[in-house]
Amino acid sequence: MLLKKKLYLLLSVVVVLAFVLAACGGTEAPAVDEPAVEEPAAEEPAAEEPMEEEEPMEEEPAEEMVEPAENILAGENAAIAPEFFDQEALDQEVAWIDAVPEGPEDMVWEQYIDPEWVDTTEYAKDGPYTICFSNAGVNNPWRVVGFNTMEHQVALETDIGEWIHVDAEGSDEKQIADIEDLLASGNCDGMIISPNTTAALTPIVEQACEQLPVVVFDRGVFTDCPVSFVRPIGGYAFGHLGAEFIVDNLPDGGNVLAFRILPGVDVLENRWAAAKVVFENNPQITVIGVEFTEGDNARTKAIVEDHLDRFGQIDAIWMDAGATAVAAIEAFEDAGLDIPIMVGEDQQDFLKKWQDEGLTAVAPTFPTFQWRTAVIAMVNILQGEQVPAWWVLPQPPVTADNLDSLVNASMPPLHYAMCGCEGMPGFPEDWGGQ
Amino acid sequence: MANVTVQSEKEVSWLRQAWARIRKIHPVFPVFLIVFLAVGYLNPKFIEPNGILIFLRRAAPLGILAVGQLFVLAAGGFDLSVGSQVTFVVIGGALLINNDPEKLTYTLLVLYGIGILVGLINGLVVTFMKVPSFIATLGMLLALKGAGLYWTGGAPRGYLTDNFRQFGRGFLEPVPVVERFPIAVVVLIVVVAIAAYIFHFTIFGRQILAVGDNPVAAKLSGINVRRVRILTFIVSALCAITAGILEGGFGGVNIIAGDGLELQAISAAVLGGAVLLGGRGAVLAAAAGALTLEALFNFLNLIGQPEGVRDVVQGLIIIGAVAYAAINARRR
């Protein structure tokens, strides 16, 4: 029985270890009674490494019983690795937000911004075509909606004779092998690639470019060999738009809780990087937390509860993806509090909640209609019609103005409204609607 | 003189008795208290009634899973499939109920039916096909995960209705003192009470321990070892379905709702003194193990530790608790 003490000992050690970790590395240990230090902002030009610039710590007059809200933009979760930040790209994307796209007005998936046309007569051939698609995966709801939309676009294209889809199931190795097999088969007239990761797929995409016309979409590659790269404006624009919305709606400042799914994914890092710049430039905004949800509703809800408990008030929530937005909202409902300003995404569950509760919200989108566009680009190339080298699609946000036209309660909760698929045959059943 | 001696002897024996009683308290309870107070020190609101209830509501699914896991562990097995069962309940529940609140009873019955079936299959595979439970339930984990994805076509469909979500999200009000009391905590208390009764006060409970301690001896003494082991998997599955209903209620439809819960449940149960490979355990202590784990996560979160540290701590707990049990068994 003496040995039970060992268990005590072990757990005490764990607890002590955690304390030690907190003392050494936990820069944001919240209970430490440090007065927030007013550091002068670094005065060097921020051009070189803007993300390392130290911002003055903000201290807000907090209510009694709750911790003073401390701006944690200097914290670990808020950090952006330099490879995920490119000021030029950010400026370009922000400028594109307000650009007027060209192309057919009622078909947003065929519109483009700042096109640089490529002549494709060298690829022109007679139909019907065999088009091959190497897909990174159909492993999340966004890709499910996109792939569905894509298949229906293929059905609409009379010039496509055969459509060969290979699913890499989220694996670089499998996708490389898939593309090798497709190339070796010699059946493909053109290839669409949605790369699993950027760097790993670049060599094989280059190899494919040597044999046939290639269209890349969604995630990019480090080569401009594809005839066309189809992409919405991008992650910086996504993050910027939501953060600007919060700043505009909190003229006197307030507490913002920021949610990210997970670190290290370029499109998501770009979203947060842009938002962080906006928050840094608006010191009246206090970012009280930057937390990773890993796409888990329960975790998201728990984080909101904890922050409400600790800071007493949250005025706005920024998210880099909206799948857990409703869970965050529910934490406020369960606590009997008003729902704060929300930045979500175009998932139906969030839009429905927004409409039902009359939220102050915005939903930047990473539109799933780009899956349609990739097919259209490929067909255009094989028909010898010119295409933009960078087919930059508009990235229309959901706002109070267009909300009602996008809410559709009969669709699944994680259906992405900006799919450009409403007019397609088979809608809504084929997308899981009723 | 003699009087004094008697008195001091009495005192000594009283002290001894008290010490014996203290030593009988399972270590997980004081450990829980320490972690709990540590969190309370960092965040005073945590130990206010409302904070405690928020905490309990959040810990309820894990508590129930730990109790279910205890049954399997005590009989000498593992159930790795509970996390997938939770996910299955969340996405399957949304499909079954199909936005119609009147289908609640039907949905719950079907879900518990599936639970019993899953537990039965786990148990049959382990007992009759002689597949080690670690492997059998690992297979079930994958199969259920795949089945869930297949059933929904890769993205969750439908919503869980408010009356389904009440169990995990709702409150009883008005309640004296705390004003409102989470229904999930009521469910947790009821499950723990029932499980404690079965585990500690019925023949079946004693048979579980006998089977886990020494299956051959148990068989020789006339216990139907297979039946006992199958039943433990069914108990675990029923707990997993219940936890899934709470989890879905708390968080809503989510395809990763149950990810990682199986390991947390095992960690919680061993923290509560259940011995891997069977033969020992206590229901209250397993539930307390779940609360400790959840409080520990909360603590790590409060001091700003990233996700990785959380996993490290969980790993240390499993290894430490198993090592402790192994040393203990050798000296026994």
Image (cartoon, coloured by chain):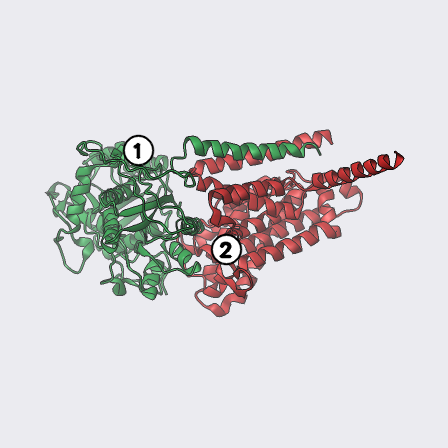
Q: Relative to residue B108, is residue B215 depicted above or below?
A: above
Question: Residue placed at 44% from the left, 34% from the top?
Answer: A22
Q: Are the residues flagged by discs 2 and 1 from a single subunit?
A: no
Q: Which residue is mark 1?
A: A200
Which of the chains bears the disc numbered 2? B
Residue A361 at x, y percent in the picture: 28, 58
The residue closer to the viewer here, A39 or A350, is A39
Q: Quadrant of the C terminus of chain B?
A: top right
Q: Tell me the quarter of the picture where residue A215 sits.
A: top left
- A410 is higher (above) or lower (below) than B230: below
Give the percent coordinates (x, y) of residue A302. Answer: 44, 50
All told, the count of numbered labels is 2
Q: Dot 1: what SS?
A: helix
Q: Within 10 angstroms of label 1, few (less than 14), some, or many (20 or more) residues?
A: some
Amino acid type of the residue tagged 2 in the rendering: Asn
Work out which residue is located at the far bottom of the displayed protein and give it: B102
Q: Colour of chain A?
A: green
